[in-house]
Amino acid sequence: MATSIIDIQKVSHSYFRDDIEIPVLKQLTLNIEPASFVALLGPSGSGKTTILNLMAGFDRPMHGRISINQINVSQLSERQLARWRAKAIGFIFQFYNLIPVLTAAENVELPLLLTSLSRAQRAKHVATALRLVGLGDRMTHYPRQLSGGQEQRVAIARAIVMDPAILLADEPTGNLDSEAAEEIMILLQRLNAEQGKTIVLVTHDLEAAQRATTICKLQKGRLV
Amino acid sequence: MLLRYVIRNLARHPLRATLTILAMSIIILAFGLLRTTVASWYADSLGTPPDRLRTRHAVSISFQLPVIYQQRIASVPGVAGISYANWFGGRWKDGKAFFPRYAVEPVSYLELHPEIQLSPSQREAFLRDRRACIVGRKLADKLGWDVGDIVRLQGSLYPGDWEFTIRGIYSTTSPTTDEGSLYLHWVAIDEQRRIEDRDRAGTVGWFVIRMANPEQAAQISEAIDRTFTNSMAETRTETEQAFRANMATMSGAVIRAIEIMSFLILGISLLIVANAMAMTVRERHHEYGILKTLGFRASHLGFLIFGESVCLALFGGILGVVLTYPASKGFGMFLTSNFGGFFATFELPVQLPVLVILISVGIGLLGAVIPFFLCLRSRIRDELRHVG
Amino acid sequence: MSIFFSYNLRHLFARRITNLLTITGISMVVFIFVGVLMLAQGVKYTLVNTGSMDNVLVLRKGAISEIGSGLYREQAAILETYPDIARLGEDPLFSPEVVVLITLEKKGTGAAANVTLRGGSAESFRVRPQVRIVSGRMWRPGSNEVVTGKQVAQRFKNGALGQTLRFGRQNWTVVGTFESGGSGFESETWGDADRFMDAFGRTYYSSAILRLRDPSLLPTLQTYIDEDPRLQVSVTPETAYYESRSGGLVNFIRTLGLMLTGLFSAGASLGAMITMYGAVANRTTEIGTLRAMGFTRSKIFSLFVFESALVGFIGSVLGIALASLLQFTSLSTINFATMSELAYGFVLTHSIAIWGVLFGVIMATLGGLLPAIRAMRTNIPHALKFRGA
């Protein structure tokens, strides 16, 4: 237990819509060990995205405790949280969320702007990250000039450029055809195996989930 | 039904609609104030009764005429009354508060200017006291004067230190005649000239003439000027309206600049409305695409877009005009008290609301042109894909 | 930060129609703002340049303008012998002048406008070295010849070289035109003092210009005048006289112009706000993504504030560029202090340009403030769920 990198203890959370409380997570406990690849599998509404949001500190749990690397996320201030997030977490989205007006390299460079690295150092990191995802030759392309799979790989490069220990991926293949989806999953596997990244993957796609080392099934806010 | 759709659309983005209406109303407010400024500038020349003429030196207003011309002018056929006046000039206190000061022959001057209203007792007191003056109601209020107070002036055209007792405070019947002047006895100041500056004694700035028949203005003017042809001081006679309009047009460039400015700012409001509409249309791409698949033609979409745009501009315009009324009070007070020399009165032109409504509709229509073409240009396929 | 700059620029370009409309709006407000300042500056420049630092203007005591002043020949004779007057060779730099207003017809409209007529002698040019005859020649003393200022020559009927003006019941031949570096003299007509006195039936001068050996000797001259009862005159530095002439008009243009500009700039500010709210709404996902990457709220805030400042900057530079074209035009209006027509141009100075940029940037930034706060407050999970562009 002490070795877990992500430690979720009895977390309950609900949303309010028009003053009606909608419970999403109920007394959820989950431990994730370092360098593991965990898939959270469940239908929409099962609360899997909520767990991700809570882990990243986008939201604070109503009850329970979330520790990441022994840091109690819910106790960090807004500012500390932002700084911690930049260093510790890489986020991968279903719709890639690349910034359309920036090139692939510039998109990857974005998180580095929060550091004190020099321009040359930043360029080196960007090149490394893009090479790692196999897009070393697409640096100056704009997102609209890339295919969906390539866009997602740029997004992954952006997530790993700060070298975070944890990658959180929210349906990363949800918007891709099966071939591109497979490429992305292989890339994630590689990142897990070769770089030792802890990856939490949220998906409702069983095939994608099978690439993970551990599968946790969620239903109505509980692990099953 | 389409109209209801237009109205509902307006309410879909309340923040943007509010901001657009607000921006439009502020600019219309500025427009209203500018138009009023221009109108007030010329107001002076419109408010004078048409039965009066002014005779001045032919060279320019800075030259004086001998007072003895009075009899010769009076004998010109068609002249029913005559008076004369001159600028007193000078300076009050530090000279910062400027107001016109005229030296007049009081009996005939008041008789020829019925719009200067004075109570009989004050009139009597003014006529009896050679060292007296009367001041306008607005001027008295502004400088805190009352009947019995003494006004001290430092002379310029008439050198020396002068003291005049306020014997009356006049008001005016016509809204375009100013209540910001001071009148004093011409005889009182000419007396001193006869002692100290004989060369310039017995001269006046202009004669005011009342015509028996205003329709004869041209003939009477010509007859007067002919009387003095080839004399030492030739005259130039014109109606008071022409005289004042001439003074107003001499400042034309400033007024024209204000006029240009008032139209430029309408351009700004046009840009704001067009911008808001362009954003709205862009957001509703998908919706317009659906409408097109339902068989809506360009004219229907046009009605939706132009209708919304005109509504925005019109609401803004109406709000702006409503705001102009209270705002012009403060602005007018500021102008007449700081630039009394330029503006005697500050009244909103009556036709302003109509003008603004027409302009607003125009801005609404023009503002929708670019957004409408943006909407037409895109094809259904693109619009539906917009959602992803 | 350079990537932010290009990031903002590219965003502005991505929404170019909306941003172009906003930028044009701001540039128009800045154009008017700068135009008003340039106009006021132009009037001031024209009038202040008219006077010269070393010259002293002599007027009748109590007179506030040359037109309303009178100076007798005896008084002029006494002053001319004053020992501290500067000399050019033998002659003292002293020029008694007669100044009257005449009415002339303008070209084009034919409207009558007042023109200042200045009667002097060769001395009038010697005390004002900035006034130069640029075409034709100086009038012959004692003749009905006149020289016209550049503005009179251009704007009035019969004012050009070789033409004949009629005033004071006599004809006057224009034998030359002069320039004076854009000062108010260019709106005047000059001729022989004695001929003018004769034509207007006057026996005395209006004023006199003299130059002291040293401007600091003015108080001594004042004492000298105070002690001589024949000299009921006042002395003022020429620059101070012309500066006081400009006060009313400059103040009027500036106050009225800036009050109204201030008012409708609020409209343009709201326009910028509409655009920026749109930009924020459009980029909700993007904001969420940046926040997920670890961008702090204040970074997001400054990103949007910077973007609106950029809009303001581009708009104001455009507006100033447009306004600088005004320098090629000139206007004329009556100067209420002298009651005569005065021609002047628009003058753009560095400080006016800086004020223009500042004005535009502040206007746009104020408009971007509330939208930037909204951007800053964006809730990350909601933003990431949002499918915008």
Image (cartoon, coloured by chain):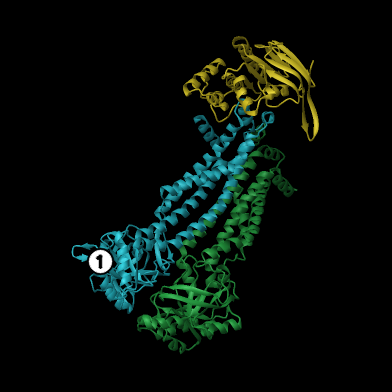
Q: Colour of chain C?
A: cyan
Tell me the residue that label 1 is attached to: C123
Residue at the far left in the pictured view: C90
Quick check: C90 above or below B70?
A: above
Disc 1 residue type (three-letter): Glu
Q: Residue at x 43, y 78 (%)?
A: B205
Disc 1 packing (10 Å; few <14; some 14–19; many ≥20): some
Q: Quadrant of residue B111?
A: bottom right
Q: Colour of chain B?
A: green
- Across and down, in percent, residue B128 comes to 53, 85
Query: Which residue is more in the foreground, A144 or B338?
Result: B338
- Across and down, in percent, residue C260 comes to 54, 55
Quick check: A196 above or below C305?
A: above
Query: Does residue B259 appear in the picture of this structure?
Result: yes
Please identify the quadrant where the N terminus of chain A is shown: top right
Label 1, secondary structure: give it: helix
Q: Colour of chain A?
A: yellow
Query: Which residue is more in the foreground, B191 or A188?
Result: B191
Q: Numbered disc 1: what chain?
A: C
Q: Is residue A22 left or right of residue B68?
A: right
- Across and down, in percent, residue B142 comes to 56, 68
- Across and down, in percent, residue C319 comes to 48, 47
Q: Is residue C144 left or right of residue A73?
A: left
